[in-house]
Amino acid sequence: MSIRVFQSFPDSRSCPTVQVSNRSACRTMRPFSGSDCLKPVTEGINRAFGAKEPWQVATITATTVLGGVWLWTVICQDENLYIRGKRQFFKFAKKIPAVRRQVETELAKAKNDFETEIKKSNAHLTYSETLPEKGLSKEEILRLVDEHLKTGHYNWRDGRVSGAVYGYKPDLVELVTEVYGKASYTNPLHADLFPGVCKMEAEVVRMACNLFHGNSASCGTMTTGGTESIVMAMKAYRDYAREHKGITRPNIVVPKTVHAAFDKGGQYFNIHVRSVDVDPETYEVDIKKFKRAINRNTILLVGSAPNFPYGTIDDIEAIAALGVKYDIPVHVDACLGSFVVALVRNAGYKLRPFDFEVKGVTSISADTHKYGFAPKGSSVILYSDKKYKDHQFTVTTDWPGGVYGSPTVNGSRAGGIIAACWATMMSFGYDGYLEATKRIVDTARYIERGVRDIDGIFIFGKPATSVIALGSNVFDIFRLSDSLCKLGWNLNALQFPSGIHLCVTDMHTQPGVADKFIADVRSCTAEIMKDPGQPVVGKMALYGMAQSIPDRSVIGEVTRLFLHSMYYTPSQK
C-alpha cells in the first residue's frame, strides 16, 4: 500500500488530503477533516477546564466574552485610541490638587481680563438691569441705540476690518430698513397668514439655485446663517442614511480647513467628524488621504469653496467622483464664497467647477448675508434633489396642538429678514452682483500681488476668490498682526500653523484702501525684520501660546469664559 499526501491548499481553512492506492485501505483510512485540525485546541480546552466546577466554567466564559466585547468597543471607536487616551490623561492630571489650583488661577485671571475688556469698551454706557418703570420715548431710544453702536475699536466703514461687514451702501440700508419695517412682524410658520413672505423665500432659493447651476429638481430653504445651513445639511444626510442605508453610527469626511460649524453639527447630531489633512503647498485637501478616511459608515463628503482660513478651494470634482463611486452625498460649503464664488468665472477669472454642474454634488451652503450683501441673519441651503431636503424637515404628527412641521431649526422665523434678503437681491440684480464680484476679486488679486513682493512673508496656497492668508518663516507672524492692529487694521488670526488673513469685501474696494493696506504691511514688516527673532508680546502672544498647550480642553474652558463675558452685566447689589 502506498500513501501520497498532497500539500495543495485551496483556501486557508483546508487541511492536507490523503490519497490511498489500496482500495481495501479506504475502509480503514479517511482524509483529515476540519475537526482533526481543531482537535489539539479542543483537547487543550478540555484539559484546562476538566477540574473546574460548572459555575467556574460559566463565569470564565461570561467574563471572557464580556471582556472581549468591552475591548472591541474601546478599540473600535470612531475617535482613535491615542486621542482618547491623551484626553483621559489630561483629565486625570487636572484632578491633581496642585495642577488644578494652577489651572483655576489662570482661568480666574482670564475671566477677569475678559470682563475688564468689556467694562472698558462699555465704560461710557449705563447698564439697564431692570425694565424702566416708564417706557422711553422714541427719541431717547434712538439716542441710546446710537451710543451703543459707537462702541468698538475699529472703523469698519473705512475698510479696516477683515470680513464681518461685506458691503454698506446707504441707499440699500434705507431700502432694507423700510422693507424690514413692513415685514417685521410676519412669520412664514403661518403660511396661511403670510403667503407672500413664503413666496419671497421660495424665490430667494430658486434664484440662488440658478446661480449655482441647479436644474429644475434643485431646491432648498433659507436659514439664519451659514452655521444653520451646514447643520441642517448634516441632519438631512444623517436621517437619509439611517432610513435608506441603515447607518446608525454615522461619520462625515471633511478637510481640516472646513468651517467649525461641521464640528458643531457633529456635536448636535452625534455624527463623528473625520478630518483630513491638507496639502502643505496648496492648502487643498489631500485627496488620497481623503479617500482612505471613507468607510461604510460615511454619510457625507465635504469640500470648501473656498475655505475660511486660507481662501483656497478643495478639488470638488475629485471629491464628487468619490461620492459617485461610493454612493455617498457630497456637500460644498460655499458660505464664505457665496455669490462671489458663484460668479467669479463670469467675471473673467479661472476656477475649477465646484457647484451643481459637477456630477455628484448634492448640496451647497451659501450665505446671502455675506457676498449677497443682505442684512445679517440670512443664508441658503440648496439640494440637488428633493429626497435630501425631505430629511431636513422635522415633522410631528401626534402633538395635541396639531400636526406640526418646520423646515429648519426654528419654528417661528423672521419674515422681515426674508423680505430684506429678497429686496436686496432684487435691488442688485445679476449685473449688480457681477460688478461687485469683479471689484472684490480685482482688489483681492491686487493686494495679493503687492504682498507677495514683500520680503519676510508668504501667502498660503493660491487664493481662489477674496481671502488672502499671510505667514512667515522668519518671524512670528502675530507680531505683524499686532503692528497692523495698532494702525487700525483688524485681521483674523489663524493657527496650526500660525497665520493671519484678510477677507476682502466691498468695503476694501473703496479708493486707497488696498494701497494703504499694502503700504502698512510693507512698513510693519520692514520694521519687524530689523529684529526678526524678537517674540510677540501683549494680547497677540496669547494666540501663539494657545497653540502650544497640548491639553485643548483648557483652551476650551478659556473660550467658554470669553463667551460668558459677552453677557456681562454688573453684579446686582
Image (cartoon, helix red, strand yellow):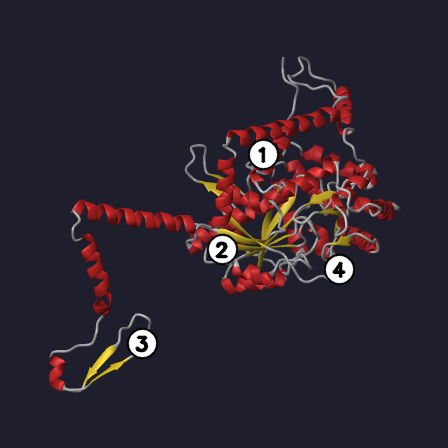
Disc on res. 9: 3
In the image, what residue occupies the spot 74% across and 57% down? Answer: 344
According to the picture, the residue beneath numbered tag 2 turns out to be: 298
Structural distance between the alpha carbons of marks 1 and 2: 31 Å
* Image: 242 above or below 34: above
Task: Decide: few, some or many residues near mark 4? Use Cα within 10 Å; few <14, some 14-19, many ≥20.
Answer: few
Q: Which of marks 2 and 3 is in front?
A: 3
Q: Do labels 2 and 3 touch, CB within 8 Å?
A: no
According to the picture, the residue beneath numbered tag 4 turns out to be: 346
Q: Which of marks 3 and 1 is nearer the N terminus?
A: 3
On the image, the x and y values in percent for residue 508 come to 81, 46
Residue 270 visible in the snapshot:
no
User: Callout 3: helix, strand or loop?
Assistant: loop
Which quadrant is home to the C terminus?
Answer: top right
Q: Which of marks 2 and 4 is in front?
A: 2
Structural distance between the alpha carbons of marks 3 and 4: 64 Å
User: Callout 2: helix, strand or loop?
Assistant: strand
Q: What's the residue type where badge 3 is placed?
A: Phe
Q: Which of 417 and 468 is in front in this view?
A: 468
Q: Do labels 1 and 2 touch, CB within 8 Å?
A: no
Q: Which of marks 2 and 3 is nearer the N terminus?
A: 3
In the image, what residue occupies the spot 16% across and 47% down? Answer: 54
Q: What's the residue type where badge 1 is placed?
A: Glu
Q: Earlier in the sequence, mark 1 or mark 2?
A: 2
Structural distance between the alpha carbons of marks 3 and 1: 60 Å
Task: Decide: few, some or many residues near mark 2? Use Cα within 10 Å; few <14, some 14-19, many ≥20.
Answer: many
Q: In which quarter of the image is residue 460?
A: bottom right
